[in-house]
Image (cartoon, rainbow, N blue to C red):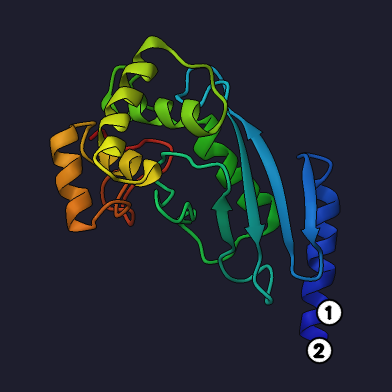
Amino acid sequence: MANADNSMAEFITDLELASQMYGIEVVNEDEKQVKIHVAGIESTPYAGGIYEVVFNFPVNYPEGIPHVTFKTPIWNSAVDPKSQNVHFLGSETWNLITAIAYVEDLILKTKVDEFSTYFRVARFWACQFAGAPKSPEDIQLKSVVDQLVDMGFPVHAAIIALSNSEWNAEHASEELLRGESGVEAGNDREEADPTSPDEH
């Protein structure tokens, strides 16, 4: 009981401090659940998008890794495209401030060539799900999604499959038929730098 009380006390202290740095909404204090909204910035594929992210911290806070989910879908090498759960690398201990900073960096400090497939795909997701302004290219990419939807595939599954297939409709449809959509976004997650995504 003492350990639980200490964990909650430390969480509340960190929450008060983090609230001075970030716009945090407490979802359930007893469950150590909070959410934030992050706005994408220029020079990243997420520019103009707004992302809602929910954090669930473990009972032994600050020990352990939080369960963090993007409620606004995002294409990022550190985020599972199907579950939208964040993959934390580099530490087994994350407090509220370090966890939020890590997630913010996924959006604000992504380093990727704007002419790469990765950028184009991440940008499409930003337009499709996060409210970023659409370009003619995004409209063209959406037309390929519509092709798969017309074949009977769900929209979100089609987008994931196309994202995994460099927007090749034939390859994406084969992936969907195999039931493999949503497996990977980028390469090996254990080695990926979340702010420097590998190009597809």
Residue drawn at point x = 81 percent, y = 89 percent: 1
* Residue 118, horizontal then vertical, whole percent: 31, 30
Residue sitting farthest toward the top: 136
* Residue 146, horizontal then vertical, whole percent: 32, 30
Residue 9 location, quadrant = bottom right
Name the image quarter holding the C terminus: top left
Report helix, strand or loop for mark 1: helix
Total marks shown come to: 2
Q: Amino acid at mark 1?
A: Asp
- The image's mark for residue 1 is 2
Q: Amino acid at mark 2?
A: Met
Task: Answer with left or right where residue 126 lies relative to residue 177.
Answer: right
Report helix, strand or loop for mark 2: loop
* Residue 27, horizontal then vertical, whole percent: 77, 57
Residue drawn at point x = 77 percent, y = 45 percent: 24
Looking at the image, which is closer to me, 147 or 192?
147
Task: Answer with left or right where residue 97 lies relative to residue 103.
Answer: right
* Residue 60, horizontal then vertical, whole percent: 67, 76
Q: In the rendered image, is residue 49 in sight?
A: yes
- The image's mark for residue 81 is none
